[in-house]
Amino acid sequence: MSALETNVFPIANLRALSSPYRLYRIRGIRMEDPEYHQNLQTLIRKLSYSLRSPVTSIMQNGETRLVVRDDAPEPPSPFPLVRATAYLDRLPDIHTLDYTLSSPETDPIRLRFVQFMLQAPLSSNPQLWQPGSGEPFFEKTASEALGHISRFAGFAVRAVLTPDAGIGLCVDVKNKFLGTRPLPVHITRDQFRRWKGRHFVYHYGHQWYDLQAYELSDLNVTEQLVFRDGERVSLLDFIADASRKPIPQELAQLPHDAAVLHYYNNTGESRAAPVGLCYPVYDTQEPEVQRYHHTTILEPHERREMIQRFSRRFLQNLRFGDQLVTTSAKAIQVPRKMFTLPDYRFGGNTVVSVRGTPGAVPATLDTIGRVRAAMLRDKSVGFYSTDPLQRQYLFLPQSVADSWGNQYVRDLRHAVDDLFPQEHPFDPIVVTYNDRKPRTFVEQGAAILDAAKQYCTKGGFASVMVHRVDQGPRQHDQLAAMVVRKMREFDVWAAVNHSTVGQECYVLAHGRDGQPYYDVRREKRRKFSGYIRNVALNKVLLTNERWPFVLASPLYADLIVGVDVKHNTAGFTVVGDRGASIRTICRTSSQRERLLAGQVQTHLLDIVSKEARLVAEEIRHIAIHRDGRLFESELAGAQRAMDTLRRQGTIASDATLTLLEISKTSPAPFRLFEVSGEDGERPFVENPQVGTFHTIGATDAYLCATGRAFRRAGTVQPLHVRYVEGIMPFEHCLEDLYCLTALTWTRPEDCTRYPISMKLTDRRLGEDASEFDADALELAVQATEEAE
C-alpha cells in the first residue's frame, strides 16, 4: 500500500530540550505606523546578529514583546530605526521554554530557538559551507564540473511544526553555481570593472561565505592593515593566523602583493578580502548556467534519496552547547487527501467535466489538458469570452519592420484569428519605433514613448516587441516595466514580448521570381508555432481580458479578491459570481509592499459595491487571497470595509470575511512523495497526484496544484496556504483555491501552481509594478523632444 511521505524529520528528544528566555516591552514603534513591520523585522535581524543569539517577537495582551534567550547579552536601548527609535524595557520574569508544549504564543519561540540551534553545529562542520546566515548549506566538494563552472549540491533546513504539534526539520535539496577559478590574484582595475557589484564566495581559510564586491583597493594584502587585539596587522597575516591549521593550499600560496577588494558585512561595515580567494557566483538566469539548468531538476526518487542522505549525514545528532538535538531517521508520513478538478465552461455553453457531470464533455485527470486545448481549437466551441477585441496596437522595432516584420504581422494575425474568430479579422495598428540606437533601457524606452506619443491618439491595448537590453544578470527587465507602466499614460494597456525568437526563427529566402521574402526556418517551425500562439494568447487575448474558459462548478465563496502590492502599485484580481466572472484592477499606492488600512477599506468598498450590482444573489461569503504576508493594517482595513458594507446593505447582514496568506517561496520547501513497495525492496517513488493536500493544525496547509497527471519533469512543490482569520471552513477555502489554480489560461494543456487570483495580479504587477530608472528615461525623452 502506498503512503504520502513528507520531507520533514521529527525531533525525537524535545522533552530533553529547554531554554530560559526573557521578554522586553517595545516602545517607540506602533502597529499603526507605516514602517512598523519593516522596523520590527530590522530590530529582530540586527539584534540577532549583534547578540549572536536568537531574537524573535510575540503578541502578548495586544502588545508586541521582544523575546531574547536568557544567555544572551542585554540588547542595546534605545535602538535607531527608520523614522523611529525603539526603547526596550525588560520585564521582570524569566520564562522557561518547554519545547513539547504548543500554543500560538510559544510556537514562534520554539521554532526560532530550534532554528538557531541548527546554525552553530552545521556552520562548524568542516564538510559544509554556507553563503550567509539563514541560507542553505553546501558540501565543499563540487557535485559536477560544467566547463568553467562548478555545481555544488546542498540542503536547506528549517524548523517546522509537525501534525502532532511537535517540531521537525524540513529538508530540501539546493544547488549553487560557482566559477571553478577565483579572480586573478593580480587583477587590474580595468579587469575588475566587469566584476564590480557581483557576488563571490570568499574562501576565508576553511570558512566560505558570500560577499558582494564594490571596490578594488589601491593596497595589496601586505599593505592592507586590519585590527587584531588592538594592533594593526596585514590582511594576509590576519587571515593566515585566524584560519584553522593546516591552512588551505590556496591561502598558503597567496603572494604577498595579491590584490584586495572591498565589501560590506551584515552590519554595513567595510571589509577587505584578497581577490585571489574570491570565486564568482553565477546566477541561474545567466546564460552560462541556463544551459545546465536541467541538472538541477530532480525527479521525485532522486530528490527523496538526496534529502535522506543529507539528513543522515548532517542532521541526525546536532549538539548546541550542552544540548543535543536528535532527529528521527524516518520522515513523517501523512494521510492522503485530494480535491477533484472543477467543471469548465467554454464557448457555446460547452461544459467539460472530470466529475462525470451529465451533459458535459467527459475527461480524466490524464486527458484534461488535451481536452481543454481541443475545446479551444474547436471552432464550434472556442473561447468563453466572445466580445470583439478593442483597438489593438502592435509596436515593432524599425529593424524588425524593415526585415521580417511583415511576415510576423501576418503570422500573428493568423494565430489570433485561429484562437479567437471574430466577424472582423484581427487587424492591429502597426507602429514602428527607431531602435537603431544603443541597446539600453533608456535609449530604447525613449524611442517607444516617442512613437506612442505620435500614434496612440486613442486608448486601447498594445503588444510591444522589444529587444533584450544591456543589464546585469540579476536585474529585472526595466524596459518591459517601463513600457507597461508608461503606456498607461496614453490610455493603453500593454504587454511585452521580445524579438529574440523571431530573429532566431525567421530567415531570408527568395521566391521563384527571385524576390526576397522571410519565412520560418524548417527546423524551427515547431518552436515558432508555440511562440506565435503564446504571443496571440498571452500578449493579445489575455491582455484584452478575453478568458478561454471559466469555472462551471460554483465556489464556496461568493466573491474572492486576490491582493498584492509591489513597488508602489496595488493589484487586485476579482473573482465573482462564484467563479464565472473575473477582472483585474491596478492602483498606485504610497506604500511599496503593503497597504494602509484606509487604502484597503476604500478599494474593497469600491470592488464589492461594483460586484454586488452585477450579481443577482446576495453576497454572503468573501475571501481575500493575499500574495505573501497580510499586514495588520490590511486586516484592519478589510474588517472596516466589511462593517460599512453590511451597514449599507450592500452585502448580507451576516456576510463573512475569510483571509488567506499564500506563500510562493520558502527557505526549505515542504514536499510530498508517493512512496510504495519499501518492504525489503527498492521503493517506488513518484509525485503526488494533482489536487493532493495536507493540513497542519487549524491554520497551515499545503496544496499540490501540480501533480503527476501532467507528467512534468521534476518534483512537485506544494503551495503553502495560511488561514489568517475567518468563518469559512479551511478545507472549503483550500478547495476554492485549488479550483482557481485549474484556470490554466496561459497554458491550457498544462497545470499551474498558482491560483488565478494570484496569477493575474502577479502578471500585471510583474510588469506593471517592476521598477525602472524613471529619471534617466525622462532625461532621454526631453533630449529627444529638444532635438526635434
Image (tube, rainbow, N blue to C red):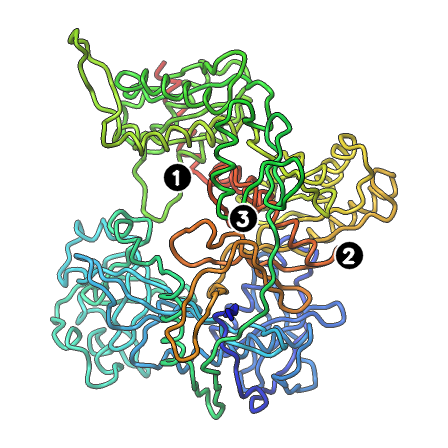
Quadrant position of residue 534: top left
Q: Residues within 10 Å of mark 3 (few under 14, many from 20)?
A: many
434 relative position to 335: left or right: left
214 w.r.t. 353: above or below: below
Instruction: Please tell me which of labels 2 and 1 falls first in the chain.
Output: 1
226 relative position to 160: left or right: left
Circle 1: residue type: Asp
Quadrant position of residue 503: top left
Query: Whole-Å distance between the Cαs marked 3 and 1?
Result: 22 Å
Residue on which the image places disc 1: 477
Query: Whole-Å distance between the Cαs marked 3 and 2?
Result: 23 Å
Q: Are marks 2 and 1 in contact (CB under 8 Å)?
A: no
**Whole-percent x, y for residue 28 in the image:** 66, 64
Q: Is residue 585 visible?
A: no
Circle 3: residue type: Tyr
* Residue 754 disc label: 3
Q: Residues within 10 Å of mark 1 (few under 14, many from 20)?
A: some
Instruction: Please tell me which of labels 3 and 2 falls first in the chain.
Output: 2
Q: Is residue 311 visible?
A: yes
Residue on which the image places disc 2: 727
Q: Residues within 10 Å of mark 2 (few under 14, many from 20)?
A: few
